[in-house]
Amino acid sequence: MSGQEAPASRRTVIITPAPTANGDLHLGHLAGPFLAADVYTRYARAQGREVLLGTGFQDTSTFVVTTAHRRGVAPAELVATSAEQIASTLETMGIGIDGYTGDDDRFTKWVVDFIGRLYAAGRLELRTMTFPYSERDGRFLVDGFASGGCPHCLAEGCAGLCESCGHLVAAGELVGVRSTLDPSDPVTLREADVLVLPVERYRDRLRAHFEANAGGMRPHMAQAMAHMLSRPLPDFPVTYPIQWGIQVPFAEVAGQVVNPNAEPMAWSMHASTLAAEHRGADTAGEDALWLAGAGSQIGYFLGFDNIYPFAIAGPAMLLAFDGRYELPTWYLTNEFYELDHRKFSTSRGHVVWGRDLAARVPRDLIRFFLATTSPEHQRTSFNADALARVTELRLVAPWNRIAERVNGWAGRGPLPVPERSRHAAALVAERFAASYELAGFSLNRAAEAIADHLGRLDRRVVSDEDAGGYCYEVRELVRAAAPILIDLAAAVLADDTGSAATEITPVTLPHLVAVGAGR
């Protein structure tokens, strides 16, 4: 999505925002940022580029507390279970994360250090803000604790961030505010002193940065950012007067915690550092990859609802360090992925878990279908019957017919590969590259290319004289589709030595298993 792709000599740091540790990953999570980040990472590495991919889980969100309350379990127990499930699901779906963050002392200390340096430099200021307050429970209601209408677009949701318009939502400004834990609990408004970042100070620089990197955003985000940056930005609360979260050591706000939505930049640095360490690099500090001049191109794969903390408040924090850090240059957003045209909901049991589906359906089929229906520009929906129909029609059936044809020549050769087949394969690779490169990244178009070229090869009339060229084109299609069809590529390309060839010895190709067959 950036105007320019990072040169091969420059590392790309990719971050997918940490899911809340209040449950496993469902298909809505996977169809958005996680699959997209994995596909791009696989493609870029195949081009010889250095890429670091980091994510993890977030246990400081108030949604951990509300979910634990609903389930009747302790928040710490929910976090422990969810963290393990999230990591397991990513692995099950073949999403290769380099750096997986947790809730250990190293991370906590880094967040406190990062916020503490802003505090010591005088970048944070004490402000009196209004919050909903539960007289019954004796606590302030922020983020997931408070529900109501967004003061900007009127959509129903929780405080903190609006899932509909992307704006920051101050809990005290919710329309018809109520307690999420107990809607019958009478809610009043109380004032509390908190530390804030005066984001308005950085608005001109934020606007200039995003105007210079306009190619790094999809249209919906670009529109929202232009709207938010066209008017004064509200103070961003860095601390909250609640107990759940990372405690801060500042006397003016004793007993308060870091606002979870103020963690993203520190968390992103930590995730990228873990990713570098996992791949054998010495980073010399949690923020080393983000330092100005460090040679990193930084970007995010994220849901649209996360743009405020990661693209406004977070970069404003970086600017507050007076040139110490690079700013992210691209944000590849996605919209909501629904289940049968209704929002995924664990509380209502309206959900499909990634690991559960992978136990019944080959993951290449899942990855192909999620790529086909990825919510890149508008809400899309998952349906189990559609998964079966689409993968059978566009992937399984044509591939298996192609495999049968190629297997008839297995072991013969080496067979000559004519120039026209090498040219055709180059055109295929070019089409896929246009879908994989950040400037035009699209899972939808990559999946469409897979289906189109499988159909073309399936319909093609092939003589024995053309067997070498046909087998070569099949192999190169698999190579191009490898970031999505990871298991098929691993089987077909296991002994492959490269794409440049004037001859080929056909090998036996595996068949794909349709949904519900042999599982």
Image (cartoon, rainbow, N blue to C red):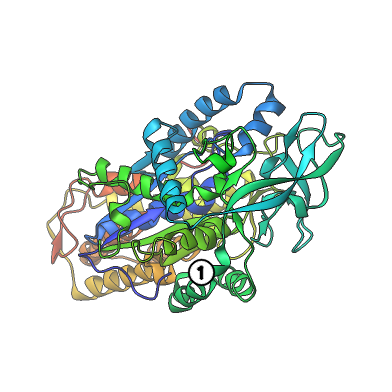
**Coordinates of residue 104 in the picture (x, y in percent):** 41, 31
Element under label 1? helix
Residue for point 32% across, 42% down: 274
Q: Is residue 69 left or right of residue 176?
A: left
| In the depicted structure, whether residue 28 falls above or below residue 204 | above
| In the depicted structure, whether residue 61 falls above or below residue 10 | above
Q: Is residue 427 left or right of residue 181?
A: left
Asked if residue 443 shows in the view, the reply is no
Q: Quadrant of the N terminus?
A: bottom left
Residue for point 43% across, 66% down: 330
**Number of marks in picture:** 1
Q: As rendered, which of 86 and 193 lies closer to the eye?
A: 193
**Coordinates of residue 132 in the picture (x, y in percent):** 77, 44
Label 1: which residue?
202
Q: As rendered, which of 316 and 443 lies closer to the eye?
A: 316
In which quarter of the view is residue 226 placed? bottom right
**Coordinates of residue 253 in the picture (x, y in percent):** 58, 41
Asked if residue 164 shows in the view, the reply is yes
In which quarter of the view is residue 320 placed? bottom left
Q: Is residue 326 left or right of residue 444?
A: left
Callout 1 amino acid: Tyr
Task: Characterize the local packing of mark 1: few (<14), some (14-19) or many (20 or more) Cα atoms within 10 angstroms.
Answer: some
| In the depicted structure, whether residue 66 falls above or below residue 414 | above
**Coordinates of residue 53 in the picture (x, y in percent):** 35, 50
Residue for point 48% across, 58% down: 123
Residue for point 45% across, 48% down: 115
Q: Is residue 400 left or right of residue 473?
A: right
Residue farthest to the front, as pictured? 251
